[in-house]
Amino acid sequence: MTEHVTQPSGVILARFPERNGRPGVVYRNAGDSFLLVEFGEMVFDLTMSFRVLGLDDVIKRNRPAGLIETIPALRSILINYDCRQISVRDLIDFVEDQYEHLPPFENLVVPSRIVELPIAFDDKWTREAIARYVQYQRADAPNIIDGTNSKYAAMYNGLRDEEEFFRYIMATDWWNAALGFFPGLPFAYPLDPRYAVVLPKYNPTRHWTPAGTVGIAGPCLAIYPVESAGGYQIFGHTVPIYDPLQRNPAFRESPVLLRPGDRLRFRPRVTDDELEALIQAVYDGTYQYVIDETATFDVGAYLRFLQEVDPEAKAFRQRQAEAAARVPVP
Amino acid sequence: MAEHTIKSPLPGIFYRRPSPDAAPFVQEGDTITPGTVIGLVGVMKTFHQITADVGGKLVRFLVENEEAIRPGQPVAVVSDEV
Amino acid sequence: MLEVRNGGFETTVQDYPGRIGMLSLGFAPAGPMDDYAFRFANVLVGNLPGTAGLEITAGGLVIAFQDERAIAVCGADMGARLNGQPLELWRSYLVRAGDLLEFDYLQGPGFRTYLAVSGGIDVPPVLGSRATYLPGAIGGFEGRKLQAGDRLPLGEPMTDPAQAAGRRVPASLIPSYSGYNEVWEVEATRGPQADPDYMTAEDMAFFFSHHWKLDAASNRTGYRLDIHKWQWARESGGAGGGHPSNILDNGYPVGAVNVCGDQPIILCIDGPTLGGFICNAVVAKAAMWKLGQMVPGWSYIRFKEVTLEEAITLLKQQDETIHESNLERS
């Protein structure tokens, strides 16, 4: 069954077509310590995340010697392995075997916490990061209008103005498909496709982004957990999601607040001053994060919901595509 | 008259101003004292002050603003004749 | 106990291979940038491979010893002096209570040097490692670089310090570092998003032949290279974003060359673990040490393409080289 295909460039190590309703798989060379496993096509399909997290789970449970860890993302799993202990060929065969035997996912009801996060839009922290970028890196970036990215974000998605863009951010729950980039950073995707905004990335990337910044690139929303470089369009600020000093009860078990499979919900909208007070309350231990620990996510019900809203979602995508075609990319 | 050079302990990019639109830390001809900041070295996204280790008159800079410098490279000449 | 009199420019506690298995939560491994020098320093003083030591970047560290230990300094020449006497690199010495070890600034090629002390730096492990991870402010000594007044606990030596002292790495195994304005040849494989799907064959030919200038803003997080106008094999990033360097976010291999818009950035050991830009190459694990000795703002890099098999061979050779049986008595 295993059919190892190689390209002249050596980048693709194996490729398998779609089988029995399971998306095709491509195994890409990622150096002597990593293997990238990609599922399906490069399209935004959130349901892929349920499959990926399902496969990731069985890989972890059956891990062979030499497999160090897996890094799941929306449509891929990056595998870190020790090439002195397991060959990439054996690793591919192992993953294929797990994928072959993966149970159907359509009827799953998975644990999925709901985490509510307050948000300030076009806040002083975001404006500061953008101002520094204009001053030190690129003054003529088309994605910066009036010292913000939000006006550009509205234009790029065919929305009336930044206020409508902010409403879209708050109108959908965000599925956290993966953590990474920096500690505890969520890669969250909109569960409601009617509000699935899309944005290009910075070019070049920002040298500096403050911790707590909320941004979007592609369809993906991220919260910067630490002060860092970054490539996402940024438009908001929220409470800490990472605390290495574990000063709040929410961080008692781990310095990382969020988990893969969490749903993020931005509410309430707050002012800069209100948010500053909330951040202070996080660090003095009095802020209580609003987390529904026992919530579950019904994949089947979600798939039915997607069908119901499909006409509206299609209409929005159409409007988006037309708008994006008229707007320059950075 | 004795001349002394101020050296950079670090490799990196030499800056004469705290930020692009600010005035230079010091001008040629200025009188400085030990500890006076005469410039910054930017490396690894951090900026380190270069301070005078002697006092006197800053006669001239030996490197341009935003020029790459090596560790131990003289960046300015100081004269004890004020 | 080690008493820090001057922390220098950037000195951190590190261990090898760092914080492994945490990429999926967003924790880069950290550890020494030049693992070749670091590991040899540990071998010289008779430490186990996972023992923590110090990474000294660009010099300036001054420390005092409070008991008898074997020490070794490997890496860039910073004019190290023990009680005022010049200390030879790549050699183990015996130190006693009250001895003072001083590092000046860089005296020649190279950028980092490593201090191993028999017994190791015994800071508490955080999430499985003593390595300082600066972007996440965890590990090492209080999650930060060292400063005057810090007192670092030491572990119990595995071997008699007097026995471990007086050994050296043979000259044939001491790497020579490329100087200022000189080129480092760095072995790398093609990455998961190279040609033909993401870049053109011409893009990759340019990538493997150009002498890339290392930007002064490079650090343990990323090594920034020149801006280049790539041809690209795609018009846009599709669902990943508007620019052809964009993809739907996936895990990043440690050591990957991440092309962000027009700019390639090598993701170093404190780098991002996941993101939405392509990775067109991955530095061979056995070549990662070279990054640690390049001088930001001065060094040039030429990537030498190797196959996966060649990269694995290099790694095995390196493991055999960094071994106690290769040391000489001096």
Image: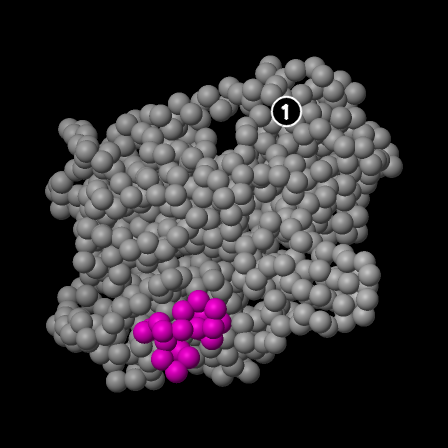
**Residue type of the residue flagged with mark 1:** Val
Subunit that carries the residue with mark 1: C
Q: Residue at x 44, y 52 (%)?
A: C224
* Image location of residue C159, percent across then percent down: 73, 21
Image point (58%, 53%), residue name: B69
Picture quadrant of residue A252:
bottom right
Of residues B51 and C306, which is closer to you in this image?
A: B51
Q: Secondary structure at mark 1?
A: helix
Q: Quadrant of residue A62?
A: top left
Query: Does residue A41 appear to the left or right of B64 in the view shown?
Result: left
Left/right placement of residue A47 relative to residue C11 reads left
Give residue C178's position: percent from left, percent from top.
52, 36
Q: Nearer the viewer, residue A281 or C157?
A: C157
Q: Is residue B6 visible?
A: yes
Quadrant in which the N terminus of chain B appears: bottom right
Q: Quadrant of the C terminus of chain B?
A: bottom right
Coloration of the structure image: one colour
Residue bounds of the magenta highlight: A129-149
Query: Vertically, is A241 above or below C182?
Result: below
In the image, what residue occupies the spot 67% across and 72% down?
A: B27
Q: Residues within 10 Å of mark 1 (few under 14, many from 20)?
A: many
Residue C162 in the magenta stretch? The answer is no
Q: Is residue A136 magenta?
A: yes
Q: Which residue is mark 1?
A: C43
Magenta segment's dominant SS is loop
Residue C234 higher or lower than A137, as above or below: above
